[in-house]
Image (spheres, grey):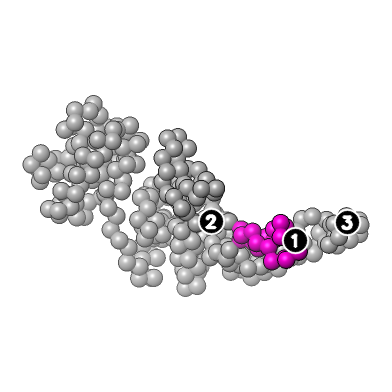
Amino acid sequence: MITDSNVGELLCSKCGFVVKERIEETGPEWRSFSRDEKDEKGRTGMPTSVAIHDMGLSTMIGSMDKDASGRSLSGSMRSTVARLRTWDRRSQVHESADRNLRQAFSELRIFSDKLTVSEAVTEKAAYIYRKAHERNMVRGRSISSILVASLYAACRDRGIPRTLKELAAVSNIKKKDIARSYRLLLKEMDFKMPVASPAKYVSKIASRAGMSESTQRRALQILVSAEKIRISAGKDPMGLAASALYVACTLAGESTTQREVAEAAGVTEVTIRNRYKGLRVALGI
């Protein structure tokens, strides 16, 4: 995805499809309060964020070895400023809680970039992790497992179709450990997560398997009919979406095997067959 800051659009680099338009600028703001120098821009810095260990409120000593007049510093003063710069960085993470949050949020940025989730999801994950840290839920447990579980909870809360298997792949943590930490978050923090809709996984599976747009629309119609008669309750949304796509392929005459659909969805062929039979019998197809 490419963000065009000039027109405020988020677009696909392959097909040029505009995913979102008139998006808000999240970068630093350029402003000038000087009356005499109207063309000179003064930088105000990044906005505050819960995904930074100090909320982005702390200051830092710059890396340029120059004084206010733009002249280079002497050798002795340069070493003094370098020592001050080192102690400034150390003072920001003096306590163990600050070191914990700094490590966690640096990993959070990496995982968010790999999963290509929005800034809102990252902020929500950071908020959940901060609440878990305040309740001492991280003590005696892996920082990464609680963090990835918080990211998964944020994806579920925002309706982003990301599975535990995808999170385990980008974080190098076992799926079982992430699920255990996620259940702990739900139990201790009393979260009410919305039920994932199978329709949100249709486009992902279809793009991986190379299916047509008409097949995707047919699969969405099948899922809507399945939800009306309530046969989708308690079913895995990824497996149900894959089965609806396979039913749509069968009706459209596309040559797609159950193995191809199962590999694209990350489920077994047995799941595809069982859900396929259930959909055809319940909907009378």
Q: Which residues are magenta?
A: 28-46
Q: Which residue, given by chain and number where applicable, does mark 3 sit on?
A: 71
Q: Which mark is nearer the camera, 2 or 1? A: 1
Looking at the image, do the residues carrying marks 3 and 1 touch, with CB atoms under 8 Å apart? Answer: no
Placement of the C terminus among the 4 image quadrants = top left
- Amino acid bearing label 2: Glu
Disc number for residue 53: none
Furthest toward the top, the residue is 255
Is residue 253 within the magenta segment?
no
Callout 3, which amino acid? Arg
* Distance Cα–Cα, label 3 vs label 1: 22 Å
Q: Tag 3's secondary structure?
A: loop
User: Which dot, 2 or 3, sits closer to the camera?
Assistant: 2
Foreground tag (3 vs 1): 1
| Vertical arrangement, residue 167 with respect to residue 94, above or below | above
Q: What SS does tag 2 mark?
A: loop
Give the residue type that dot 1 points to. Glu
Residue 226 place in picture, x, y as percent: 16, 49
231 lies left or right of 44: left
Q: Residue at x 20, y 47 (%)?
A: 223
Residue underneath mark 1: 37
Disc 2 + disc 1, Cβ < 8 Å? no
Spot occupied by residue 250 in the image (x, y as percentages of width and height):
18, 32
Is residue 36 left or right of 118 when viewed as pictured?
A: right
